[in-house]
Amino acid sequence: MERQVEKYIHSLPDIDLLEYSRIQTHLPEALEFARIELTDRHFTSEHLTDLEQQLHQRAKALEEAAHVVAAEPLSFEWRLAVFLCGLYSGIPLVFFYPLWQKFREKGADRKFKDMWLYALIGFCCQPVIILLGISPWNWLAKLF
């Protein structure tokens, strides 16, 4: 194992070290060194209980923050832009694909769903506007 990793693990605060030792995605050698570092620090049972409680509170706060991000709706400007792109046969929606992916990766489920919903509404409004006899080039002028 590299010396840099050992220095990093050695410099971690107690709570971060405890959290690091529980993440199974690290290299086995790094996890072993973290467990050795934990035993070298000679924690008392009260201190370990306190660290466990702090770790639980940290996890709960992260979960609440993720829930807030997931429930946040799409802004009006973005809804309008996606609707208008859907109105134009959805072709301009290709430009929004990276944003959709970003919302999905960040866990912003509501924004992800809102983008699909408003694009679909715009696309479904297209035949109605055509039946009303409004040419595609004048849609924006007629809407406003």
Image (spheres, grey):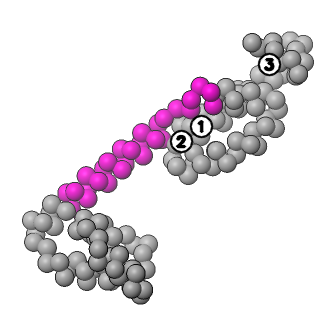
- The residue closer to the viewer here, 25 or 11, is 11
Tell whether 101 sits left or right of 51. right
Circle 1/circle 2 CB separation < 8 Å: yes
Q: Amino acid at mark 3?
A: Leu
Residue type at mark 2 is: Asp
Q: Pointer 2: what residue?
A: 109
Which quadrant would residue 8 be assigned to in this image? Answer: bottom left
* The stretch drawn in magenta includes residue 13: no
Q: For mark 1, give the secondary structure.
A: helix
> Which residue is at a point 39% across and 44% down the rendered structure image?
65
**Secondary structure of residue under mark 3:** helix
Q: Which residue is labeled 3 in the image?
A: 140
Could you give the CA–CA distance between mark 2 and mark 3, rounded to whole angstroms?
A: 29 Å
The image shows residue 114 at horizontal and vertical percentages of 60, 33
Note whether residue 128 is visible: no
| Mark 3 or mark 1, whichever is nearer to me | 3
Which numbered disc, 2 or 3, marks the residue closer to the eye?
Answer: 3
Q: Is residue 45 in sight in this rendering?
A: yes
Image quarter hosting the C terminus: top right
Give left or right: position of 98 versus 75: right
Segment colored magenta? 52-78
Give the residue at mark 1: 113
User: What amino acid does circle 1 point to?
Assistant: Lys
Q: Report which quarter residue 6 is drawn in.
A: bottom left
CA–CA distance between discs 3 and 1? 25 Å
